[in-house]
Image (cartoon, rainbow, N blue to C red):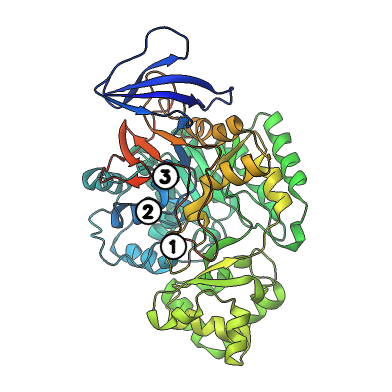
Amino acid sequence: MDLVIRDARVIDGTGAPAYRADVGIRDGRIAVIAREGGGSRPGAPRSLDADGLALAPGFIDMHAHSDLALLRDPDLSAKVAQGVTLDVVGQDGLSYAPVDDRTLADTCAAIAGWNGDGAGIDFDWRTVGGYLDRLDRQGIAVNAAYLVPQGTVRMLVMGWEDRAAGPAETERMKALVAEGLEQGAIGMSSGLTYPPGMYAPDAELTELCRVVAAYGGYYCPHHRSYGAGALDAYAQMVAVTREAGCALHLAHATLNFDVNKGCAPDLLALLDAALTDGADITLDTYPYLAGCTTLAALLPGWAAEGGPQATLARLRDDATAWRIRHAMEVEGADGCHGVPVDWGTVEISGVRRAALAGHVGKTVAAAARERGEAPFATARRLLIEDRLGATVLQHVGHEENVRAIMRHPAHTGGSDGILHGLKPHPRAYGTFPRYLGRYVRELGVLGLEECVAHLTSRPAARLRLPDRGLVREGHRADLVLFDPGTVAAGSTFEAPRTLPTGIPHVLIDGRFVMKDGRRTDVLAGRSVRRAPAD
């Protein structure tokens, strides 16, 4: 053995009761598991006394926005300190491959609030395979898998046009999705409240999902509404993937806004009926009530047609800005999930321009009161001056919905964590310890072994990773050791970048990336590429 972890309380990821064992690691894999009382104990030049600690598979973040942070921040303690050993990026239909020079610039502008504007990054790739190769060449803090972003693909073929694709355009998009999957992507994502992906009709999505299904991948939509009409939007995605014969993974599957208070049982009944009928469905959630996105995302979809510069031109025009305000505040814009925006729930969490930093931490309504102007005027000015880069928190969730959905057997954990901005959502730093501390130990919503399964083996099964997600001989030694009695998220809305407690050790491929509560300098992460279809 290279290393033996002694006297650990093994929570193996299956949901079975924990047991005590020594776990021996050799060449980056679990070589032996010697249960207590089972005979001889393995030896090794190095050992770690894990008495009092739980040993679990590394946590898999099924919804991560670390696409550029993986390259920009080799430390990435925000994820490593949570016990995360694999991030799934390329989410919400917008990321940085496949692109050309034009669409790369537009993408950097459109999702600057998620990842920054790309300053300091050498974008030496244009394809999915090129991006994954770059991760491997540079070395990264945690492993990373990639979803082909449907909005980015549509942008590459059709620009920012709000119309259905023609036959030749559809074939080109299908070819790009297939190319991304062949190069290692594990599925396809969409952001159906984000332009330009939101402009795709269901028939177009179905055709792309047929390609995903042919490669054994899964479709991960941020669907068309989490507010008004949310249940219909969920049903839409179930219907699309059923017709295409494609596995479905529902991104940040929650129900928000007043219209959905207490509606989680309706969603779960919809999903259970589809599962009983043979559908392949999983989902992820984060254990918080507030959402997080860009301020520009709340605009009506028609205001974004043509791309970021066209959006800014519409905002600068008084007559068009009035139409935008009416759509947002009266009609309920599609970007805000069909619900009239309540500016008192929209908190500014990050800006690109330092001169605008005084807005951070305030709701749009509060910032407007300080200036003696209407909230839309404040939002409009911020969008223009910050070039669409501002991020916001939306305080629109419901605790009963969060708890009900996380109990479902198809549930997995995903942070949806945006690491950029002055005051990011605390879920970026706290999702996984919050599950274990708040919802297991304090509230008892999930049992410990059950919760670990939600965060490890279930996502590994969705990703079709045969040697991850379990503490099992022969599996990769991606492992986390934590104290069930003290593990907790340190991050709060007031101090969102505070690291968690109770997670002293994290290993990737048998190498310590966190040891004794401190980040090491090890970059053990690599790209995790799609397994060949059966």
- Tell me which amino acid carries mark 1: Trp
The residue sitting at 35% across, 38% down in the picture is 184
Specify the quadrant that holds the N terminus. top left
Residue 387 in percent (x, y) is at: 42, 77
**Which of the two residues, 364 or 282, is positioned nearer the viewer here?**
364
Mark 1 falls on what kind of element? helix
- Camera-side residue: 171 or 402? 402
Instruction: State yes or no: discs 2 and 1 in contact (Cβ < 8 Å).
Output: yes
Tag of residue 67? 2
Kindly tell me whether residue 45 is visible in this rendering: yes
State how far apart marks 2 and 3 are (Cα): 9 Å
Q: Is residue 325 left or right of residue 428?
A: right
Residue 108 percent location from the top left of the image: 36, 65
> Residue at left 45%, top 72%?
306
Residue at image mark 3:
87
Residue 349 relative to residue 476: left or right: right
- Mark 3 vs 1, N-terminal side: 3
Percent coordinates x, y for residue 131 in the rendering: 29, 49
Mark 2 to mark 1 CA distance (whole Å)? 9 Å
> Where residue 114 is drawn, which disc sits there?
1
Label 3, label 1: how far apart the Cα atoms are: 15 Å
Q: Quadrant of the C terminus?
A: top left
Looking at the image, is mark 2 or mark 1 earlier in the sequence? 2
Count neighbours of disc 1 (C-alpha within 10 A) and say few if under 14, some if 14 to 19, many if 20 or more.
Answer: many
The single residue placed furthest to the bottom in the displayed view is 372
The residue closer to the viewer here, 515 or 395, is 515
- 273 lies left or right of 169: right
Give the numbered dot on residue 23: none
- Label 2, secondary structure: give it: loop
Q: Amino acid at mark 3?
A: Asp
Residue 92 visible in the shown view: no
Of mark 2 and mark 3, the one earlier in the sequence is 2
